[in-house]
Image: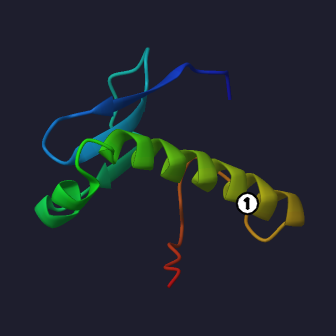
Amino acid sequence: MPASILEIIDLGDGEIVLQRVDDDSEPLVVISFSDETRAYLMDNGLEVAKAMIQTGIQVAAIVAERGEIEITTTMEASRVLH
């Protein structure tokens, strides 16, 4: 897969997306904060979303190194962690 430049955009409605700069396809990641959470975070939602995305990428790399999952362009199964 060729390298892409990614951008994080705050849509202003409680959603923050990670998307490719040079592509009009759907976002790679969508983070949606409820009104209650946005009030709690005040103006720090973008910073929290950046941390969430960075941590997610780090964990995905660790999991892929261990061979626990195969990272592909499509997900066949979803995992919910509690």
Residue 50 position within the rendered picture, expressed as x and y whole percent measured from the top left: 48, 42
SS at mark 1 in the image: loop
Residue 37 lies in quadrant: bottom left
* Dot 1 alpha-carbon crowd within 10 angstroms: few under 14, some 14 to 19, many 20 or more: few
Residue 76 position within the rendered picture, expressed as x and y whole percent measured from the top left: 54, 67
Q: Which residue is mark 1?
A: 70
Q: Is residue 44 above or below residue 64?
A: above
Instruction: Identify the image quadrant of the N terminus.
Output: top right
Q: Is residue 71 above or below residue 1?
A: below
What residue type is disc 1 on?
Glu
Query: Residue visible at 69% across and 57% down?
Result: 60
Q: Is residue 5 above or below residue 54?
A: above
Residue 11 lies in quadrant: top left
Residue 48 position within the rendered picture, expressed as x and y whole percent measured from the top left: 42, 49
**Left or right: 10 with respect to 29?**
left
Say which of 51 and 8 sits in front: 51
Residue with the most extreme right position: 66
Q: Is residue 23 above or below residue 12?
A: above
Residue 40 lies in quadrant: bottom left
Query: Residue visible at 78% across and 71% down?
Result: 68
